Image (cartoon, rainbow, N blue to C red):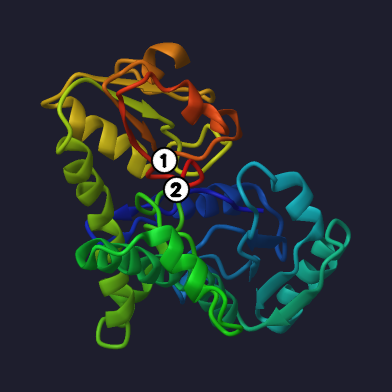
Amino acid sequence: LLCVGTPLRDGSADLGDLLAAADAVDRVAPDGALVVIESTVPVGTTDLLASRHPRLAWAVAPERVLPGDALREIAANDRVVGGAPEAAERAARLLRTICAGRVEVVDARTAELAKLVENASRDVELAFANTVASLAEGFGVALPQLLELVRRHPRVRLLQPGIGVGGHCLPVDPWFLVEAQPDRARLLAAARSVNDAVPGAWVERIARHAGTIGLLGLSYKPDTDDRRASPAVTIARTLAETRDVLVHDPHGTEADLRSGSLDEVLGRDVVVHLVAHRAYRGLRARVRQGAVVVDAAGGWT
């Protein structure tokens, strides 16, 4: 099983680690050995590796786990497996030994595209939610009330707007499609542009308030220590360039940011709820009297 990073480099997928891993496997594996790619990869990657290492049997089954709940989801989630028929069936039999969910066998390009579409779909949905939040601000409409009203419609499933999109998947994977099919993926590029601009908009909102700033949360999502491409970290670093900023996160912080205790952060002039960790529930009442509260994560208002 190959599950190595496929980061973005200058707008393109960097397959260096994956290619190196494939080369390493080829040096020691016997003829016909099954190799399953679990990384999220551009469409055509499995075919590329099969052409580079034709004596091995190649399949692709992109992982679908949620950070923080990986072990349960490995066993429970449905899986999509792609490849040449024999290799894909072998991979499916392997996955069925550990996966209680449905294992669907398709060709490699379909499996690769399915994973990219899953992540791009959520990125687009978040871009729409963040656009709605921006529109509400522009019209002077209270966002919580607007969301509550809109969600009463039986066919509307509007996501919660946030401070941006982070992690190692959603900000990266849509670009694999944009690079390959730019004319057909304009919506995906636009969504990325929208979501990339959200942290900067929050910096502007927070910076309008004078005084010291306390930021609650640095991870890219609640209740994890994963800070990869976290918009909260981007916001903290940008504000710290010109303001007195103190940060807190129960799951860990960044060495270049000045951190403080929970009470110290809650005692600042401006207190920003950036990430909705469970540890922060009900803490608004502990913010010092007279401080400005910015509820970027939601749930405090």
Q: Residue at x 51, y 77 (%)?
A: 113
Q: Secondary structure at mark 2?
A: loop
Point 15% across, 27% down: residue: 210
Q: Is residue 214 something one can see in this rendering?
A: yes
Residue at which label 2 appears:
167
Apparent side of residue 184 relative to residue 52 in the rendered image (left or right): left
Q: Report the residue that reaches farthest toward the front.
A: 289
**Residue flagged by tag 2: what amino acid is it?**
Gly
Where is residue 230 shown, x and y percent of the image? 38, 42
Q: Nearer the viewer, residue 54 or 197?
A: 197
**Image quarter for residue 258?**
top left
Classify 288 as above or below 97: above
Outermost residue toward the left? 242
User: Does residue 87 sit above or below 271 in this rendering?
Assistant: below
Taking the image as shown, residue 161 lies to the left or right of residue 47, namely left
Q: Secondary structure at mark 1?
A: loop
Q: Nearer the viewer, residue 1 or 233?
A: 233
**Mark 1 burial class by Cα count in 10 Å: few <14, some 14-19, many 20+:** some
Query: Which residue position holds label 1?
Result: 228
Number of numbered tags placed on the structure image: 2
Q: Which mark is residue 153?
A: none
Q: Residues within 10 Å of mark 2 (few under 14, many from 20)?
A: some
Across and down, in percent, residue 7 comes to: 38, 52
Tell me which amino acid carries mark 1.
Arg
N-term-proximal mark, 1 vs 2? 2
Kindly tell me whether residue 116 is visible in this rendering: no
- Observer-nearest of 286 and 259: 286
Q: Are marks 1 and 2 in contact (CB under 8 Å)?
A: yes
